Amino acid sequence: MRSLRIAAIALGALALSGCVTPVGPVQVTRFHNGDVSQLGRGTITVEPAPGSDAGSLEWQTYRGAVMHELVKIGYTEAAPGSGAQVALMRVARSTYQPDRGSGPVSVGVGGSTGSYGSGVGVGVGIDLSPKPKALVDTELAVSIRERTSSKVLWEGRAGFTVGSGSPLATTGLAAPKMAQAMFQGFPGNSGETIEVR
C-alpha cells in the first residue's frame, strides 16, 4: 500500500513538472509562388543569411534544428557549400523591458459640499507591485533557394515572445520549438499567418 502511495506521488510530481515549461504560441508566416514541386526533395544545406554570425553558438543551434526539420520533410543534407538548394537562415533575438503602464505613485484630490458642511480630501496611492519582468523576443527567418539561380522557392518567418525567466528564453529549448513550428504542415498556405502552440 505504501509503495502505491509513493508511486502515485511520483507520478503527480512528474505530471506537474510537465506543466512548468510554458509553450507559448509561435507566430508563423510562409510564402511560396504556388509551384511547390521542387520543395521537400533533393539536397540542401543551411547557410547564414547576409548579416548573420554563423560562428555563434546560437546560430549553430538553430541551424541544427532547421536541418533536422528539413530532413524530416524529405530533404537530404549536403556538405556545406554544395546541394541543389540552400536554406539561408537568420536569427534575431532582443530583450526589452515592458512599461508598467502608470507611475508608481498617484495622487487624488476630492472635495464635497452639502448641508452638513464642506470637506476636501487628498488620497495618495502607491503601486507596490513588482516591476514587470523583461521579455525576450525571438525571430527565425529561412529562405529556400535554388543554389545555381538564387531563385526563391519558399520563405518562412517564425517568432514568439516569452518572459526572460521562461525556459524558452534559452536557445536550447527555443530552437527546436521554432523550427518545428515553421515547418509544420510544410509548405503551408502562402501568405497565411498561423499560430502554433
Image (spheres, rainbow, N blue to C red):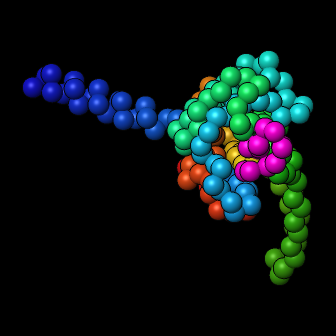
Q: Is residue 65 left or right of residue 128?
A: left
Instruction: Tell which of 36 and 128 is nearer to you.
Output: 36
Q: Residue at x 84, y 24 (%)?
A: 53
**Magenta residues, as a range?**
138-154
Measuring from the top left, give residue 20's x and y in whole percent.
49, 35
Secondary structure mainly formed by the magenta segment: strand
Q: Quadrant of residue 119?
A: bottom right
Where is residue 171 drawn, in percent x and y?
67, 27
Nearer to me, 163 or 71? 71
Q: Nearer the viewer, residue 125 or 177?
A: 177
Residue 18 on the magenta span = no
Q: Is residue 72 left or right of residue 156?
A: left
Indicate left or right for 75 with 193 as reference: left
Q: Is residue 89 visible?
A: yes
Query: Farthest bottom residue?
Result: 115
- In x, y percent, where is residue 170? 66, 27
Q: Residue at x 29, y 31 (%)?
A: 11
Where is residue 40, by image quadrant? top right
Q: Residue at x 56, y 49 (%)?
A: 184
Residue 114 image point, x, y percent: 84, 79
Quadrant location, the N terminus: top left
